Image: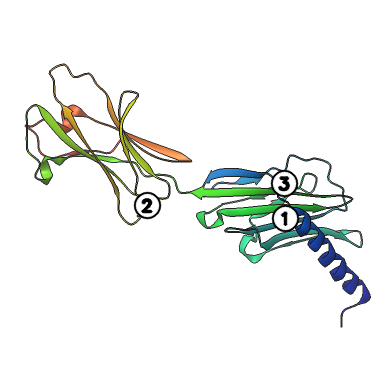
Amino acid sequence: MASEDDKYYSRNQDSLLLLCCLLCAAGDETVKLQEVEGTTITLHTGRTGIQSDAQILWSYGPEKAQKKILNSQVFKGETVTEISERFKERLQLDRTSGALTIRNISRNDSGVYLLQVIADDIISRTFSVSVYAPVSTPVIRNERGNGSVSSTEQCFLLCTVENGEDVKLSWYRGNERLSITNNTDLSVPLNLPLQIQLHDNNTNTYICVSANPVSNKTTSLNITQLCDHNSGTSESHF
């Protein structure tokens, strides 16, 4: 049977949660973060000097922060911090600022994080976190090996990269972007063709770039290697 202290603790917690949720419903500015998976990130609150006896709640959800992942409060003079099983051993709380550090973040951790601090007043802050895998390095191939017409004046190329969320593939000549592509069907690779004119003194530099919001990889075109019609089909990786 629950003790009177436990009942009081439970009623008090429920009241504070309800009040905090009502205030949060009014909305606050959302901090947007984009991170590479496998890294350690910290959700900074912009505050210092949170009261030592304040209750600090962190919640998470893919679309709305509905599930509590950390609850830290002082009960009978002792600080008690509970962390959800999903984030066990990966979360660290700074009780002075309320900042939350997440270690080894994964793409499955993308979503909305909500901080609620309950003391003399109530504050909240929302974070929208998007986690991406690093992009792959693009590969450039000469398309003659795939049945394209051979020409001593032109070179037919294809740049390919593994697709992923928000990945884009581009061809550049120097600093000028010539073309760009993406595909929401992540099951198929991205392909981007390029046709260049061959000249005896061609000094143009061509590069193929794969990029997402947190990383990019570049492969330079080796014209001598890929567009020499006396050589077999080959490819450039970096």
Residue that label 1 marks: 25
**87 sits to left or right of 119:** left
Residue 68 lies in what quarter of the image?
A: bottom right
Of marks 2 and 3, the one in the foreground:
2
Q: Position of residue 84 (x, y in %)?
A: 67, 64
Q: Secondary structure at mark 2?
A: loop
Q: Earlier in the sequence, mark 2 or mark 3?
A: 3
The CA distance from mark 3 to mark 1 is: 21 Å
Q: Nearer the viewer, residue 27 or 147?
A: 27
Element on which disc 3 rests: loop
Instruction: State if disc 1 and disc 3 touch (CB < 8 Å).
Output: no
Q: Taking 69 as reference, is 183 above or below it? A: above
Q: Residue at x 17, y 33 (%)?
A: 226
Quadrant showing the C terminus: top left
Mark 1, mark 2: which one is toward the viewer? 1
Residue type for callout 3: Ala
Above or below, comparing residue 116 to residue 237 in the picture: below
Q: Earlier in the sequence, mark 3 or mark 1?
A: 1
Residue 137: x and y in percent read: 34, 41
Q: Residues within 10 Å of mark 1 (few under 14, many from 20)?
A: few
Q: What is the three-letter code of the residue carrying label 2? A: Thr
Give residue 51's position: percent from left, percent from top. 87, 48
Neighbourhood count class around disc 2 (C-alpha, 10 Å): few under 14, some 14–19, many 20 upward: few
Write the residue at 79% across / 63% down: 18
Hey, which quadrant is residue 82 in on the image?
A: bottom right
Q: Amino acid at mark 1?
A: Ala
Of residues 50 and 91, the one nearer the viewer is 50
**Against 157, is 9 above or below?**
below
Numbered tag placed on residue 99 in the rendering: 3
Quickly name the residue at label 2.
184
